Image (cartoon, grey):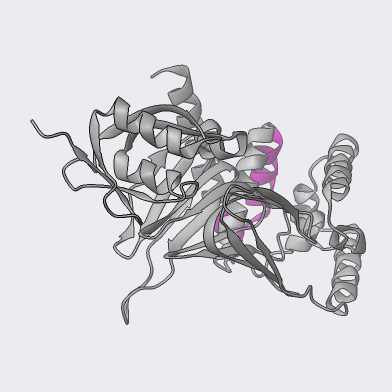
Amino acid sequence: MNPQEVQEAAAEDRLDQACAWIARLRSDTISSADRRAFAAWMSESSANRQAFDEMSELWGDLGALSHLPLDELYPESVPSAEHRGGGESVRTNNTKARSSNSDTTGWNLPQWLMGGSAVAACLGIALWIGNQWLQQAPVQQQMYTTAVGETRTVALPDGSEVKLNTNSELIVNFSRDERRTQLLRGEAYFDVARQTSRPFTVAAGSANIRVLGTQFNVERNPENTRVSVTGGVVAVSEARVGSGLQPESVKLTRNQKVSVSSSGLSNVGHTSADEALDWTRGQLVFDETPLSEALEELNRYLKVPAAASAAVSDKPLSGTFELADPETTLAAIVTALDLAQDQSDPNLTLLSAKPN
């Protein structure tokens, strides 16, 4: 194994351990010895704590943590008036506050595990703050759009941030219990502020995405929706299935991606921040990418869309292409793969193999 594979294996092992601990903590027969062992495991390393955070997100998504005092475990999950104001300064202040708390008091889960009046007082305060939040009116629905060739960064009321790619449309509708968004078309990168008590969801074509606080990219295409994760944990499931069938779902962690179509979920693949966020730098980066998939991305920028014939749709394309002039980028792809262009249809450019 190379060093990266060793690190990935260790990270997966920690996630498995965290999952096992969550299952044990939910048991009616958990003992004081179990609580002490868990506290020791949590104090071993920050990596263990991060793994527990990530698995808690997914278990919370499934409702499996409903009886655990999550507002106490994660004080940042209770929306405050300051947090509702949104903006970058809120996120910075929250980060500093968490860092300060960590430096002075450490992680507070062992305190909950061992019990005590201080915990009860903290929970009472959390419930009071939550009640104040519930008395506030929910955020009104907002719609954000970009034109062809335009990108836009949107600061949401909860402190999250969304970067919209060209020709994209996003609906945001926050309620007291949930932060719901819908990507109607295009592409968006989400940097979601953690609120354990209010999950953040994205509906995009064939895919439903659910998180509590993480970073991920969503591409909605005519035939599928692609989700790429650059940080944290993301739950992706099918939006629609046949009667009586359970939707497929998958857990994605950092540098993983999946595609969702009417046929279901693809196999989980490997990605990187460079690949997922290339469009934010005005580039398209392809690494052995099938031509049909590459054209789906390029079509967001072309005035006349392009398609590949069946004979060449799977041709692998590698390289970095600039988006400032998408027509020139298409010509470069045609040259790189030695293809022929058919522009007889004014509404579509067809790429095919050159005749012998």
> Does residue 45 lie above or below 305 as drawn?
above
Number of numbered callouts drawn: 0
Asked if residue 49 is positioned above or below residue 140 in the image, the reply reads above
What residue lies at 72% left-to-right and 65% top-to-bottom? 197
Residue 206 visible to an observer of this rendering: yes
Left or right relative to 64: residue 317: left
- Confirm whether residue 29 shows in the render: no
Side of 217 relative to 353 (left or right): right
261 relative position to 185: left or right: left
Question: Which residue is at a point 56% across and 46% down the rendered structure image?
Answer: 18
For this view, does 261 lie left or right of residue 200? left
Please say whether residue 30 is one of the residues in the magenta stretch: yes
Foreground of the two, 132 or 205: 205
The overriding secondary structure of the stretch rendered in magenta is: helix
Q: Residue 289 in the image: x percent, y percent? A: 34, 36
Q: Position of residue 309 (x, y in %)?
A: 21, 47
Comparing 85 with 293, the one in front is: 293
Q: Quadrant of the N terminus?
A: top left
- Give how far across and how far down residue 180 sits, in percent: 64, 68
Q: Tell me what residue is drawn at x 78 percent, y 60 percent.
A: 158
- Chain part drawn in magenta: 22-44
For the C terminus, give its image quadrant.
top left
Q: Where is residue 174 in the image (x, y as percent from the top left)?
A: 72, 71
Residue 36 appears in which quarter of the rendering?
Answer: top right
Rendered position, 91 above or below 327: below
Hey, which residue is sitting farthest left in the picture?
356
Q: Does the magenta stretch include residue 63?
A: no
